[in-house]
């Protein structure tokens, strides 16, 4: 099983500032990585797939980078609606996909 | 645009069977893709449960495999999950999703609580 480790567990950032979230895989997953945003009481929403491709209707302030085992999600200028929990997910190791434990992005 | 909707009992007794159905609209399951179940215990992270293809081929999380059955009904455009011998540890929000590697379409989720 590929273990996905996200850091930090909680990130406090002021609106308008940049946030960078990290995700590490226990072995190489090439670029088979997705990022999701989850707000309370809602299902996760796909933000990024293929490590760097924005999903439909995702604003350009969201960007993903990385390959192999190290990945980042950057939100360039935080809006109020961006404060949420973010998960990464690997889909390289078919069929057992695994998720990171999540990073909570909170208002500083 | 594909839409998914989970349905099933919100309460299940310990040792009994949890049964959920995911109804798909806006896309025919028979046209392809895998369809999956994911769960999230309250306040915790996401756990992959398993996938099914429209042909009926299934892939299960090894940690749940002995208790799990996922099936598909293409005539109703639905797929289902059965988890036997449930305990409190199976209390979670259960989501169904369209699987294309990434999960681009999710159901809204349904909370299943295991309690006597």
Image: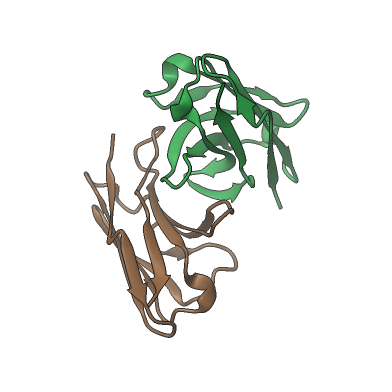
Chain colours: A brown, B green
Residue B105 is left or right of residue A79, and the answer is: right
* Residue with the most extreme front position: B116
Quarter of the image where the N terminus of chain A is located: top left
Q: Quadrant of residue B5?
A: top right
Query: What x and y, as percent, mark residue A85?
Result: 44, 60
Q: Quadrant of residue A67?
A: bottom left
Quarter of the image where the C terminus of chain A is located: bottom left
Residue drawn 64% across the image and 47% down it: B108
Residue B116 is left or right of residue A51, and the answer is: right
Q: Work out whether residue B97 or residue A18 is closer to the camera in this orientation and state it.
A: A18
* Residue with the most extreme bottom position: A16
Taking the image as drawn, is residue A58 in sight?
yes
Taking the image as drawn, is residue A72 in sight?
no
Query: What x and y, as percent, mark residue A18?
Result: 36, 80
* Residue with the most extreme right position: B75
Residue drawn 48% across the image and 43% down it: B42
Residue B116 is left or right of residue A27, and the answer is: right
Query: What x and y, as percent, mark residue A65?
Result: 33, 66
Residue drawn 60% across the image and 68% down it: A57
Q: Work out whether residue B48 or residue B17 is closer to the camera in this orientation and state it.
A: B17
Residue B93 is left or right of residue B24, and the answer is: left
Residue drawn 39% across the image and 48% down it: A89
* Vertical placement of residue A90 versus B39, above or below: below
* Vertical placement of residue B50 versus A86, above or below: above
Number of numbered callouts drawn: 0
Query: What x and y, as percent, mark residue B89?
Result: 43, 29
């Amino acid at each position: 099983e590929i273990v996905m480790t996200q850091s930090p567990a909680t990130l406090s950032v002021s609106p308008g500032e940049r946030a960078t979230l990290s995700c590490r895989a226990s072995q190489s997953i090439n670029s088979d990585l997705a990022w999701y945003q989850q707000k309370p009481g809602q299902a996760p929403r796909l933000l990024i797939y293929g490590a760097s491709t924005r999903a439909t209707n995702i604003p350009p302030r969201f960007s993903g980078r990385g390959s192999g085992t190290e990945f980042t999600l950057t939100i360039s200028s935080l809006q109020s609606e961006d404060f949420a929990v973010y998960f990464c997910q690997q889909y390289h190791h078919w069929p057992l996909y695994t998720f990171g434990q999540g990073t909570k992005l909170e208002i500083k | 645009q594909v839409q998914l909707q989970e349905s099933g009992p919100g309460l299940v007794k310990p040792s009994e069977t949890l049964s959920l159905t995911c109804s798909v609209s806006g896309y025919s399951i028979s046209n392809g893709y895998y369809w999956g179940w994911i769960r999230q215990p309250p306040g915790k992270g996401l756990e992959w449960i398993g996938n099914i293809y429209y042909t009926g081929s299934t892939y299960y999380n090894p940690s749940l495999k002995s208790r799990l059955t996922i099936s598909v009904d293409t005539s109703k455009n639905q797929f289902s999950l059965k988890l036997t011998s449930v305990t409190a540890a199976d209390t979670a929000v259960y989501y169904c999703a369209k699987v294309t590697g990434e999960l681009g379409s999710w159901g809204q989720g349904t909370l299943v609580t295991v309690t006597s």
